Image (cartoon, grey):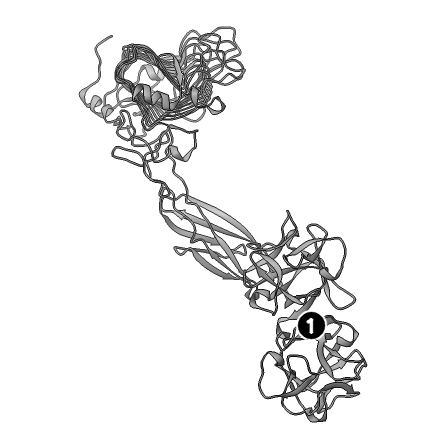
Amino acid sequence: MRKSLLTSATAAALAAGVLAIAHPAAADDGIRHVDNTAETCTDTGAGAASAPFCTVGAAVAGATAGQTVEIRGDHYDERVAVTGSGTPEQPITIRFVGATGLAGDSAGFVIDGVHDIRLENVRVHRHSDTELAPTQPLLELRDASAVTVHRGLLARYWDEPVAIPVVRLTDVTDSRLSNFTIDGTHIVGSLLMDSGTERVTVDSIHVRRLGTGIVPAAAAGIRVEGSRNAVLNTFVQNQYGTGIQVGPSATDTVIANNRIQSGGGNGIQISGATGTAVTNNTVLSVCKDGIRADENASGVSIQNNVLDSSGLTSSRCDNSSAPGPHMALNLAEGVTDAVIDYNNVYNGTRGSSHLYSWNGTAMSLATFRAETGQATHDRQAAEGDPGTWDSANSAAPGFQQTDRYGKARVDDLQLADTGTGPITYADRGATEQHIAPTVRGSVGLDLPNNSVTVDASASRPRTAPIASYEFDFGDGTLVSETSPVASHRYQETGEYTVQITAIANDGQSSTMRQQVSVLRRTSSLGLLAKHNNIYVAAEGGTLRASQVGLTEAGKLDLVDAGSGQVAIYVPTHGAYVSVDPLDGSLTVGQTIKVDDPARFTMTRDADGSISLKSVANGLYVSVDEDWRPVLIARSTGIGIREKLHQVMVSSAAQTMKAGANGRFVTAEDGGEKPLIANRTSTGGWERFDLIDLGNGQVALFSHANRQFVTAENAGEKPLIAKRTGIGGWEKFTLVRNSDGTVSFKAAANNRYVSADEAGAKPLIANRTSIGGWEKFTLG
């Protein structure tokens, strides 16, 4: 090759990975404009904006150091040769603006024998509507140095496989190709670097072959020869043959942070090269080996790679030559001085026996370790397995401080760091996982106050600490704060969506949503099972008829759910009752959204009890067997187990003070004797639950013996608590007097209950009107 024209300053800049470029000011004397759509274009001028060049070749031919050729207009059917050189401080820049580019049978760029050239947003298309087979690369670099190609699209379409590479480098030194796409159909080789090419970095290239069908195993997407070259952060997709191949003349090559997927040959192949570092690559779904080192390869380091699903036998794979078996990692006989460690290998249903090949023998991870002493930290796990994270060797040759997207290495705060080297939390594979925080929140509903309390304290940081929380309450109220807990009161009832967002200090966030029904309460009550006079309560995650009195767990709110339906809210749980879809049981958990499982139709039975029918399954709620008194929506009809008595919370555990003598009514002798107003203080015998029977009627349920008060013998005898059920004699009309007292009119005889003889005698229903002896104060 010719002697490199690279200056020491340029070499130093490229060694640091950055080529310092000083662009001239945007003036006609610094920019040579090209626009073939301009009526004033001419190839004889200086390329002023008012009189641009008509062709790219004419503009490039006269460009000197520090000048920029800026290209607009329609496509140009040209093969452009770059013949002038720039300097490290003032390169020649060729820049395409917008979607314009070179297009045609021979379209392309040739950079030959020059240095300090920068090609930006280059676009070259080789159309398929021609009979001339491609004979030249779209981009050819020969005997050149300090060339930068940055951004663009090189696309070639042809109906049959073509071995001419899309990009070819011959005797190129100290150059960088980055951030562009090589695209097309039937591309056998996308990018080739020959044995005279040195210190060239290919970075963030997307190489993809469009189309379907069999993928022959010949050639390679990217082939590297020469010394100290690198292929970094590149995506090779659906490529004919091997994704990236390192040839026999290559030395000290770095293949790092690349993703190779759906290729027809091997993912990465080291063909006899020396000193190759294959680090942090991800190889997926290739027809042959994930990574293969052929005989005579020496000084190979294969570390931190993720190899998933190699040796495919699908219809798109051509395995007629070297049919396999193929492995995730294959080391041929004659490979020397290899270091294999910290890789993830996986081959799906093919099992653990076809992960490695050593000297032509397929083996498991355990056998490979035993026979080679390598792969101490390799893992058998698929891509995406959390074991891939925070477990790489950051001291491996070729390790990059950032991943294929340029993202920094970060620590997953929820995982133990099992890697080694200066960064113990680096991830395996091409991508460093920057994971948004895990948002876990609960929404507590305080229906009596029409409010919610959102608690995101269970949220967890992942790769950055949580900096703040954002709460959107769905009614236009948005709260941002560092506290994970926030409360809000709604001004109107309705259906709302509460949104909780946890925001990490790196800007990543995750969001959860919870729908909440803030509906109108119609009553607060307890439910007494008719068949055994036991109160229903929220217990063990279900509603059960399990309490002898109305406890806090048994206090329920009846809610208007619309369309004549009701929902049941449990204040102690801050949630609605819901019908379990599996067994129909009435559960109490985190249901704060009223949908069909939380909706019921309530009917009033002829005896004054109520029954609930589930909207979700159309069955009535029944109290299960006594040994397991769970409420379950499973009955097709209404019997005694489907009947419940309502007790308003305000009417539970009431005392009755007689207006006749100011004494409290008691179920004397634990209910064995008639009711009488003779107590100056209250205890259990003096308390009664007023059962709501509808139409203004009530029943009195005595705490003394858990039985109902009856107007004995159709009212002929005094009132006594001795009935286990409610019939005609146990019903009373509750009359509210204008002075705040109440009176009771027995259904047994339509007479008012009186504390007879100014309370000296037991209560009896024997009065036709209300006087002082017939008035009682509830409390």
Q: Is residue 487 left or right of residue 745?
A: left
- Picture coordinates of residue 32, whole percent (x, y): 34, 22
Q: Nearer the viewer, residue 548 or 552?
A: 548
Q: Residues within 10 Å of mark 1 (few under 14, many from 20)?
A: many
Residue matched to label 1: 691
- Picture coordinates of residue 241, whole percent (x, y): 43, 13
Q: Nearer the viewer, residue 471 or 711?
A: 711
Q: Nearer the viewer, residue 544 or 285?
A: 544
Q: Is residue 146 visible?
A: no
- Picture coordinates of residue 704, whole percent (x, y): 63, 77
- Tell me the kind of residue under disc 1: Ile
Q: Is residue 155 left or right of residue 740?
A: left
Q: Is residue 315 above or below residue 662?
A: above
Quarter of the picture containing the C terminus is: bottom right
Q: Nearer the viewer, residue 189 or 573?
A: 573
Residue 374 position by quadrant: top left
Q: Is residue 338 visible?
A: yes
Regarding mark 1 in the picture, which secondary structure is present there? strand
Image point 48% across, 25% down: which residue? 348
Image point 72% across, 64% down: which residue? 610
Residue 404 position by quadrant: top left
- Picture coordinates of residue 112, whole percent (x, y): 30, 11
Quarter of the picture containing the N terminus is: top left
